[in-house]
Image (spheres, grey):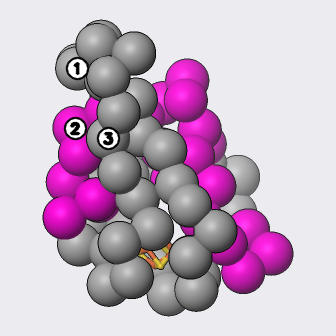
Amino acid sequence: MAKDKKLVQSGKCNGCGICVTVCPTNTKMSKAEDFDIDNAKLAIHVSNGVAAVDYGVCIACGICTKNCPVSSLAMVQI
Ligand code: SF4
Ligand code: SF4
C-alpha cells in the first residue's frame, strides 16, 4: 500500500465506471466466493453518476488514475 499517497478526484467524472473495472482491489474482492456486488465495499464505485472512493479499502495503487478517460482521478502525496 502506498501510505504516502492518496487518491483524489475532480468534478470532471462522467460516471463511466472504467475505474471500477480496472481497480485491482475491486477485482480481487469480486473473486471471493461470497462476493455480493450490491453490498460489497469496493475501493471505488459509481454512485449517483460519479465515482466514490472508499478510503478504508483503496490501497492507493494509482491504476485507476491511468485509465480515467477524463483525467478526473489523481494521486497526491499526503
Ligand atoms: S473517475 Fe473517471 S473512470 Fe471513474 S467513473 Fe469517473 S470518469 Fe469514469
Ligand atoms: S488507487 Fe488503486 S485501489 Fe484505489 S481505487 Fe484506484 S485502482 Fe483501486
Number of residues whose C-alpha sits closer than 10 Å to that of mark 1, classed few (under 14), some (14–19) or many (20 or more): few
**Could you tell me if the residues under marks 1 and 2 are in contact, i.e. CB atoms within 8 Å?**
yes
Horizontally, residue 25 falls left or right of residue 56, namely left
**Could you tell me if the residues under marks 3 and 1 are in contact, i.e. CB atoms within 8 Å?**
yes
Q: Which amino acid does label 1 sit on?
A: Ala
Mark 2 or mark 3, which has the lower sequence index? 2
Mark 3 near ligand 2 (CB under 8 Å)?
A: yes
Position of residue 36 measured from the top left corner of the image (x, y, whole percent): 59, 57
Label 3, label 1: how far apart the Cα atoms are: 10 Å
Of residues 77 and 36, the one nearer the viewer is 77
Q: Quadrant of the C terminus?
A: top left
Residue 66's quadrant in the figure?
A: bottom left
Report the disc number at residue 50.
none
Report the disc number at residue 2.
1
Label 1, label 2: how far apart the Cα atoms are: 6 Å
Position of residue 42 measured from the top left corner of the image (x, y, whole percent): 53, 48
Residue furthest to the right in view is 48
Residue at the spot 39% in from the left edge and 82% down from the top edge: 70
Of residues 67 and 35, the one nearer the viewer is 67
| Magenta stretch bounds | 41-66
Identify residue for label 2: 61
Residue 16 appears anywhere in the view:
yes
Identify residue for label 3: 75
Q: What element carries label 2?
A: loop
**27 relative to 2, above or below:** below
**28 relative to 6, above or below:** below
Mark 3 or mark 1, which has the lower sequence index? 1
Of residues 32 and 75, the one nearer the viewer is 75
